Image (cartoon, helix red, strand yellow):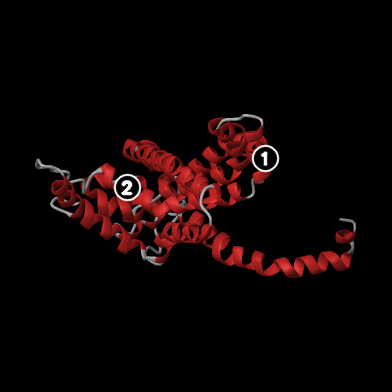
Amino acid sequence: MADLETPAERRRLFTLLSPAYLWLTVAVFLPLSAMLFFSFLTDMPQDAPDWGVTLGNYAEFLTNPTYATLLRKSLTLAFTVTGFCILIGYPCALVLAKSIKGRSREALFLMVILPFWSNSLVRIFSWAIVLRGNGVLERAVNWLLPFDVRLNLMFTTDAVVIGLVHSYLPYVILTSYLALQAVDDDLIDAARSMGASKLTILRRILLPLSLPGLLAGAVLVFVPVVGSFMEPRILGGRMGTYYGTVIEDQFVAVYNWPLGAALSFILLAVVIAILAAASPVLKRAQT
């Protein structure tokens, strides 16, 4: 650590980190700064020469209860999808990390990351074919059962949840898998030799030691899902109106960029507040 205090080492460290800082500045901070500037405008400068500065875009969120309702709806969706991803993803990661070896693990791992290799629109429309009335799922169920079943999950909240869980489940599996792989097998063997049951090993050893990876995956799921708009719009239909779809409409359909930018920053502030409230749990998991 003492060597890093020398001017030469500081210059070398700055040289190595400067491309990353430059990329963050150009790709993240400058667009965010521009959006923050737009959120305080009455109109876009290129469209209205008499544009001005106002807080009306933020006041619109406070005076129109629809936005708060949709924000609560999006937060509920994000917590629901994150919960399902944890319930499904962590056991899958546990099996991959501790129960399966060799080519079987490679094949299952390939199936986990397969959604990353396909376009998101392809995944969503594939689910639309599966979930619609008289679709693949409904025909398969009717072929298995002796009586007629009408599922027709398309354009429902359930369809939105299914599509989002399928899209973001790999994040929880991958982060949990890496955390579980770091747990020394000797600890598990020692616990077994002392008579610990599988449930005790999971509760006292595996889950506490892999909790940072699990929470990291949960954050990676929650943050994009709370502002998602593509899956709700395609799979949800009229039921798929969420906070993210309203923001997209402001930019694409209504062309009200100032209001869209203000709604985006309100969502960003809410997500940061939630993560800040959860930070004690995150810090406790890392110790």
Which quarter of the picture shows residue 153? top left
Residue occupied by mark 2:
162
Residue 199 relative to residue 65: left or right: right
How far is the residue under mark 2 from the one under mark 1? 37 Å
252 lies left or right of 90: left
Give the x, y percent position of residue 93.
Answer: 50, 48
Q: Residues within 10 Å of mark 1 (few under 14, many from 20)?
A: few
Residue type at mark 1 is Leu
Choose between 210 and 186: the one closer to the eye: 186
| Number of residues whose C-alpha sits closer than 10 Å to that of mark 2, classed few (under 14), some (14–19) or many (20 or more) | some
In the image, which is nearer the foreground, mark 2 or mark 1?
1
Q: Position of residue 77 (x, y in %)?
A: 37, 41
- The residue under label 1 is 187
Residue toward you, 252 or 178: 178
| Callout 2 amino acid | Ile
For the C terminus, give its image quadrant: top right
30, 87: nearer the viewer = 87
The residue under the point 17% across, 44% down is 151
| Percent coordinates x, y for residue 285 in the rendering | 63, 38
The relative height of residue 24 versus residue 280 in the rendered view (above or below) is below
The relative height of residue 81 versus residue 101 in the rendered view (above or below) is: above
Q: Is residue 147 visible in the rendered structure shown here?
A: yes
Element at label 2: helix
Whole-percent x, y for residue 144 in the image: 16, 46
Q: In this figure, what is the number of numbered marks?
A: 2
Picture layout, residue 194 above or below residue 75: above
The residue located at (22%, 50%) in the rendering is 237
